[in-house]
Image (spheres, rainbow, N blue to C red):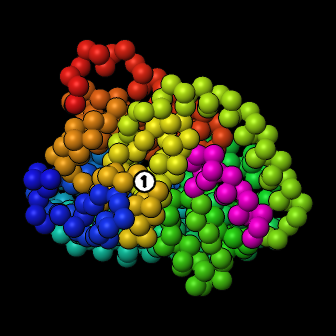
Amino acid sequence: MAYILDERQKQVSVAGANAPTIECNKVSLAGSVSQRACVFCGSRVVLYPIVDALHLIHGPIGCAAYTWDIRGSLSSGPELHRLSFSTDLQERDVIFGGENKLYDSLIELIDAHNPKAAFIYTTCIVGVIGDDVERICRQVEKEKNIPVIPVQAPGFQGSKKDGYKVACEAIFKLVGTADKPTPKKSINILGDFNLAGELWILLEYYKKMGVHVNATITGDGRIDDIRNAQNAGLNVVQCSGSMIHLAKMMKEKYGTPFMRVSYFGIEDMSDALYDVARFFKDDDMMAKARQLVKEEISRLMPELAWYKERLTGKKAAIYVGGAFKAISLVKALRLIGVQSVIVGSQTGTPEDYELIKKLCDEGTIIVDDSNPVELSHFVKEKHADIFIGGVKERPIAHKIGLGFCDHNHERKEPLAGYEGMMNFAKEIYATAMSPVWKFTKNP
């Protein structure tokens, strides 16, 4: 692997009995054009789906444009989150400060939209000029009598993963500020962002089991529900990379236990339902979960067998944000006969990569925080037939002449739950088997 920079050698491994432990949680190497995003972007993707809050970016207009409508997060009510507001800092503001502009913008927007709360995102420019954003937030909060929460996220202070932590800390300021009667057997769903309406599929499953969902953080999220989140009996963490910090803070302060789950793929989706029933020690809930799983699998398996027969032997490259998502993808692809030959993530932990190493076939390339040059070489080396990734990976696949499956947060097709597994199989088949690839160069 001569094309890997020396400083990144320990962040790449090959699955096998003697494979070394991969290094991760490192700052992106300068000059490698990392696929990671910045702290500001990380905070935005987590907080954006809170639909009845005002989201104001304190910085240049480009930061607002970069993250406008950044997730395909659907709402069952308010659409305020889909509007992009910015203080649009100019050269004059950089010299003299933008605090007055921030105050005036907040007052005008709160009067116009009457939000339940406001999140104020700081950017690189604000981190440099030193505006006292927290003071302005306290002042407006007192005047308007709604939570006004600073999100201290200058992009230069780390990676997207650091932005997740900043967002969790902003959400935590709301938790515990309301106290409403809540059923004992209730859960909060953390880290599902209702992409293409996926959350609504999950809510229907839990409803059939007799589980009350207290708050969804943050997909189709509501400020009042988040304020009462401490009263749930369990936190169910879907995207552990983005929300595990919040789950740990809630456990420490309120004693709320949490579990990690994945809603992608038949195996992980079923485990997510069983694990909740097991936690509440409810035989009736478990019986309902088993009946639900039985019905869904009986419906799906004959159809999936058709796809497996035709896709067996195909190879996939995976590079996604969270390693837990990558693990679910490996399992789901195996179910339809597709071998994972490259598996990577932007924010994986050592434990995640050890599990990936055990799941994958010997020789699978495992990579943390890759860059376009590396990914291109890996895909060519392994002769992958399809690339599964996000918006930044799409051009890599297209330049090579490779089928691409969108697993990004702006997609329009639900991939969670049993219904999502069928959508995934259809997309993989349509992409990998398209006749267009006979006109492209074989990688």
Regarding residue 36, the answer to whether it shows in the image is: no
Q: Which residue is mark 1?
A: 360
99 to 443, vertically: above or below: below
Residue 263 shown in magenta: yes
Whole-percent x and y of residue 256?
66, 78
Query: Which residue is depicted at the point 24% across and 64% down?
Result: 11
What secondary structure is the magenta-colored segment mainly? Answer: helix
For the C terminus, which image quadrant?
A: top left
Of residues 143 and 389, the one drawn nearer to the viewer in this rendering: 389
x then y, percent, for residue 366: 32, 56
Q: Residue at x 47, y 48 (%)?
A: 330
Residue 403 falls in which quadrant of the image?
Answer: top left
Q: Which residues are magenta?
A: 262-279
Which picture quadrant has residue 153? bottom left
Question: In which image quadrant can residue 392 be found?
Answer: top left
**Looking at the image, can residue 192 be seen?**
yes
Q: Amino acid at mark 1?
A: Cys
Disc 1 crowd rating (10 Å Cα; few below 14, some 14-19, many 20+) is many
**Left or right position of 126 against 244:** left
Q: Secondary structure at mark 1?
A: loop
